[in-house]
Amino acid sequence: EASNSITVQPVVSIERTVFYREKAAGMYSPLSYAFAQTCVEVIYNVVQGIEYTVIIYAMIGYEWEAAKFFYFLFFIVASFNYFTLFGMMLVALTPSSMLANILISFVLPLWNLFAGFLVVRPLIPIWWRWYYWANPVSWTIYGVVASQFGDDKSPLEVPGGIDTFVNQYLEDNLGIKHDFLGYVVLAHFAFIIAFFFVFGYSTKVLNFQKR
Protein backbone atom coordinates (compact mmCIF):
# COMPACT_ATOMS: atom_id res chain seq x y z
CA GLU A 1 0.00 0.00 0.00
CA ALA A 2 2.67 2.50 1.01
CA SER A 3 4.56 1.71 -2.19
CA ASN A 4 1.71 3.36 -4.12
CA SER A 5 2.65 6.73 -2.68
CA ILE A 6 6.25 6.27 -3.82
CA THR A 7 5.77 4.73 -7.27
CA VAL A 8 3.21 7.34 -8.32
CA GLN A 9 5.56 10.27 -7.68
CA PRO A 10 7.83 10.05 -10.75
CA VAL A 11 4.76 9.54 -12.94
CA VAL A 12 3.08 12.67 -11.60
CA SER A 13 6.32 14.63 -11.87
CA ILE A 14 6.80 13.74 -15.55
CA GLU A 15 3.16 14.42 -16.38
CA ARG A 16 3.40 17.80 -14.65
CA THR A 17 6.02 18.89 -17.19
CA VAL A 18 3.59 18.11 -20.00
CA PHE A 19 0.79 19.80 -18.06
CA TYR A 20 2.69 23.09 -17.89
CA ARG A 21 2.96 23.19 -21.68
CA GLU A 22 -0.65 22.23 -22.27
CA LYS A 23 -1.86 24.64 -19.60
CA ALA A 24 -0.04 27.49 -21.33
CA ALA A 25 -1.77 26.52 -24.58
CA GLY A 26 -5.13 26.73 -22.82
CA MET A 27 -6.06 23.10 -23.49
CA TYR A 28 -7.67 22.51 -20.08
CA SER A 29 -7.85 23.90 -16.55
CA PRO A 30 -5.62 22.74 -13.68
CA LEU A 31 -8.58 21.30 -11.79
CA SER A 32 -9.68 19.27 -14.82
CA TYR A 33 -6.16 17.88 -15.07
CA ALA A 34 -6.08 17.03 -11.34
CA PHE A 35 -9.51 15.39 -11.48
CA ALA A 36 -8.64 13.32 -14.55
CA GLN A 37 -5.34 12.17 -13.07
CA THR A 38 -7.07 11.21 -9.84
CA CYS A 39 -9.78 9.25 -11.67
CA VAL A 40 -7.16 7.21 -13.51
CA GLU A 41 -5.41 6.33 -10.26
CA VAL A 42 -8.68 5.53 -8.47
CA ILE A 43 -9.75 3.07 -11.17
CA TYR A 44 -6.35 1.37 -11.02
CA ASN A 45 -6.51 1.21 -7.21
CA VAL A 46 -9.99 -0.31 -7.23
CA VAL A 47 -8.88 -3.11 -9.56
CA GLN A 48 -5.70 -3.61 -7.55
CA GLY A 49 -7.66 -3.61 -4.29
CA ILE A 50 -10.17 -6.21 -5.47
CA GLU A 51 -7.43 -8.59 -6.61
CA TYR A 52 -5.46 -8.05 -3.41
CA THR A 53 -8.51 -8.53 -1.17
CA VAL A 54 -9.69 -11.77 -2.79
CA ILE A 55 -6.24 -13.31 -2.35
CA ILE A 56 -5.34 -11.96 1.10
CA TYR A 57 -8.78 -12.41 2.67
CA ALA A 58 -8.75 -16.11 1.84
CA MET A 59 -5.13 -16.57 2.93
CA ILE A 60 -5.71 -14.94 6.32
CA GLY A 61 -8.78 -17.07 6.91
CA TYR A 62 -11.24 -14.37 7.85
CA GLU A 63 -14.90 -15.30 8.19
CA TRP A 64 -16.69 -15.46 4.84
CA GLU A 65 -19.47 -13.06 5.70
CA ALA A 66 -20.62 -10.41 3.20
CA ALA A 67 -20.40 -7.45 5.59
CA LYS A 68 -16.95 -8.41 6.85
CA PHE A 69 -15.64 -9.04 3.34
CA PHE A 70 -16.87 -5.76 1.90
CA TYR A 71 -15.64 -3.79 4.91
CA PHE A 72 -12.21 -5.32 4.36
CA LEU A 73 -12.41 -4.55 0.64
CA PHE A 74 -13.40 -0.95 1.35
CA PHE A 75 -10.56 -0.33 3.80
CA ILE A 76 -7.99 -1.85 1.43
CA VAL A 77 -9.19 0.16 -1.59
CA ALA A 78 -9.47 3.34 0.49
CA SER A 79 -5.95 2.91 1.85
CA PHE A 80 -4.59 2.37 -1.66
CA ASN A 81 -6.27 5.61 -2.70
CA TYR A 82 -5.16 7.81 0.18
CA PHE A 83 -1.58 6.54 -0.10
CA THR A 84 -1.61 7.30 -3.84
CA LEU A 85 -3.18 10.73 -3.38
CA PHE A 86 -0.75 11.58 -0.60
CA GLY A 87 2.16 10.84 -2.92
CA MET A 88 0.55 12.93 -5.67
CA MET A 89 -0.07 15.74 -3.18
CA LEU A 90 3.58 15.86 -2.12
CA VAL A 91 4.69 16.12 -5.76
CA ALA A 92 2.25 18.99 -6.31
CA LEU A 93 3.63 20.77 -3.24
CA THR A 94 7.31 20.38 -4.14
CA PRO A 95 9.43 21.32 -7.17
CA SER A 96 10.68 17.78 -7.84
CA SER A 97 9.80 14.16 -7.23
CA MET A 98 13.16 13.74 -5.47
CA LEU A 99 12.18 16.20 -2.74
CA ALA A 100 8.73 14.64 -2.51
CA ASN A 101 10.36 11.23 -2.08
CA ILE A 102 12.52 12.55 0.75
CA LEU A 103 9.47 13.97 2.51
CA ILE A 104 7.49 10.76 2.17
CA SER A 105 10.39 8.70 3.53
CA PHE A 106 10.08 10.86 6.65
CA VAL A 107 6.29 10.66 6.93
CA LEU A 108 5.74 6.93 6.33
CA PRO A 109 7.80 5.72 9.34
CA LEU A 110 5.83 8.12 11.56
CA TRP A 111 2.56 6.78 10.19
CA ASN A 112 3.79 3.26 10.89
CA LEU A 113 4.91 4.13 14.42
CA PHE A 114 1.66 5.82 15.43
CA ALA A 115 -0.73 3.47 13.62
CA GLY A 116 -1.66 1.57 16.77
CA PHE A 117 0.07 -1.60 15.59
CA LEU A 118 3.55 -1.34 17.10
CA VAL A 119 2.19 0.62 20.07
CA VAL A 120 -1.53 0.33 20.78
CA ARG A 121 -3.44 3.59 21.30
CA PRO A 122 -3.95 3.29 25.09
CA LEU A 123 -0.17 2.93 25.53
CA ILE A 124 0.73 5.93 23.34
CA PRO A 125 1.66 8.93 25.55
CA ILE A 126 -1.37 11.18 25.78
CA TRP A 127 0.50 14.16 24.34
CA TRP A 128 1.18 12.11 21.18
CA ARG A 129 -2.25 10.53 20.92
CA TRP A 130 -3.51 13.31 18.66
CA TYR A 131 -1.14 12.02 15.97
CA TYR A 132 -2.83 8.63 16.16
CA TRP A 133 -6.14 10.23 15.18
CA ALA A 134 -4.47 12.35 12.48
CA ASN A 135 -2.88 9.24 10.97
CA PRO A 136 -4.85 7.61 8.12
CA VAL A 137 -3.13 4.25 8.64
CA SER A 138 -4.41 4.03 12.22
CA TRP A 139 -7.97 4.43 10.94
CA THR A 140 -7.44 1.60 8.45
CA ILE A 141 -6.09 -0.77 11.10
CA TYR A 142 -8.92 0.24 13.42
CA GLY A 143 -11.46 -0.43 10.68
CA VAL A 144 -10.08 -3.83 9.72
CA VAL A 145 -9.86 -5.06 13.33
CA ALA A 146 -13.25 -3.64 14.33
CA SER A 147 -15.05 -5.02 11.28
CA GLN A 148 -13.54 -8.50 11.60
CA PHE A 149 -13.52 -9.00 15.36
CA GLY A 150 -15.43 -6.12 16.95
CA ASP A 151 -18.68 -8.09 17.06
CA ASP A 152 -17.06 -11.41 18.02
CA LYS A 153 -18.45 -12.53 21.39
CA SER A 154 -16.44 -15.73 21.56
CA PRO A 155 -14.89 -16.44 24.98
CA LEU A 156 -11.21 -15.53 25.23
CA GLU A 157 -8.69 -16.93 27.69
CA VAL A 158 -6.21 -14.29 28.82
CA PRO A 159 -3.02 -15.82 30.28
CA GLY A 160 -2.43 -14.29 33.70
CA GLY A 161 -5.61 -12.26 33.43
CA ILE A 162 -9.37 -12.47 33.65
CA ASP A 163 -11.14 -14.44 30.94
CA THR A 164 -13.33 -12.26 28.77
CA PHE A 165 -14.86 -12.04 25.31
CA VAL A 166 -13.06 -11.07 22.10
CA ASN A 167 -15.03 -7.87 21.52
CA GLN A 168 -14.70 -6.83 25.17
CA TYR A 169 -10.95 -7.48 25.11
CA LEU A 170 -10.55 -5.27 22.03
CA GLU A 171 -12.50 -2.48 23.68
CA ASP A 172 -10.74 -2.67 27.05
CA ASN A 173 -7.16 -3.16 25.85
CA LEU A 174 -7.03 -1.65 22.35
CA GLY A 175 -9.85 0.88 22.51
CA ILE A 176 -11.51 -0.62 19.43
CA LYS A 177 -15.31 -0.60 19.23
CA HIS A 178 -17.47 -2.12 16.51
CA ASP A 179 -20.01 0.70 16.92
CA PHE A 180 -17.37 3.20 15.77
CA LEU A 181 -17.13 1.69 12.27
CA GLY A 182 -19.34 4.34 10.66
CA TYR A 183 -17.00 7.11 11.77
CA VAL A 184 -14.01 5.09 10.55
CA VAL A 185 -15.54 4.87 7.07
CA LEU A 186 -16.21 8.63 7.06
CA ALA A 187 -12.62 9.30 8.16
CA HIS A 188 -11.31 7.41 5.13
CA PHE A 189 -13.43 9.54 2.81
CA ALA A 190 -12.22 12.66 4.64
CA PHE A 191 -8.53 11.79 4.13
CA ILE A 192 -9.08 10.99 0.45
CA ILE A 193 -10.99 14.23 -0.17
CA ALA A 194 -8.44 16.29 1.79
CA PHE A 195 -5.45 14.89 -0.11
CA PHE A 196 -7.27 15.35 -3.43
CA PHE A 197 -8.18 18.94 -2.56
CA VAL A 198 -4.60 19.85 -1.63
CA PHE A 199 -3.31 18.12 -4.77
CA GLY A 200 -5.77 19.96 -7.01
CA TYR A 201 -5.31 23.35 -5.34
CA SER A 202 -1.51 23.06 -5.37
CA THR A 203 -1.58 22.10 -9.04
CA LYS A 204 -3.62 25.22 -9.74
CA VAL A 205 -1.69 27.70 -7.59
CA LEU A 206 1.92 26.50 -7.51
CA ASN A 207 4.16 26.67 -10.56
CA PHE A 208 7.66 25.22 -10.41
CA GLN A 209 8.37 25.64 -14.11
CA LYS A 210 11.87 26.86 -14.90
CA ARG A 211 12.31 29.25 -17.78
Image (tube, rainbow, N blue to C red):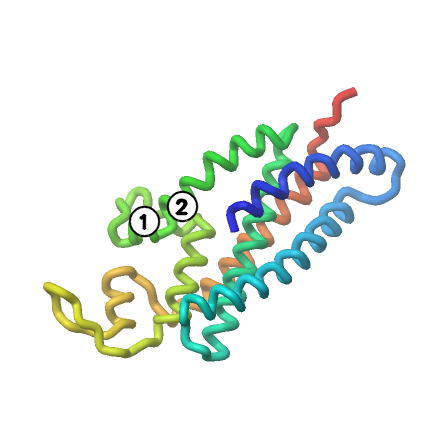
Q: Residue at x 46, y 41 (%)?
A: 108
Which numbered marker is on residue 118?
1
**Residue beneath disc 2:** 112
Specify few, some or many for label 2: CA neighbours under 10 Å numbering under 14, 14-19, or 20 or more. some
Secondary element type, mark 1: loop
- As helix, strand or loop, the secondary structure at mark 2 comes to helix
Decide if residue 6 is on the left or right side of residue 127. Answer: right
Residue at the extreme top: 211
Observer-nearest residue: 137 or 189? 137
> In 3D space, how far apart are the residues under numbered discs 2 and 1 (Cα atoms)?
8 Å
Give coordinates of residue 92: x percent, y percent: 65, 37
- Residue at 34%, 68% in the rendered image: 177
208 relative to 109, above or below:
above
Quadrant location of the C terminus?
top right
Q: How many marks?
A: 2
Give the x, y percent position of residue 135.
44, 49
Q: Is residue 148 left or right of residue 97?
A: left
| Residue 195 picture location, percent across and down | 59, 47
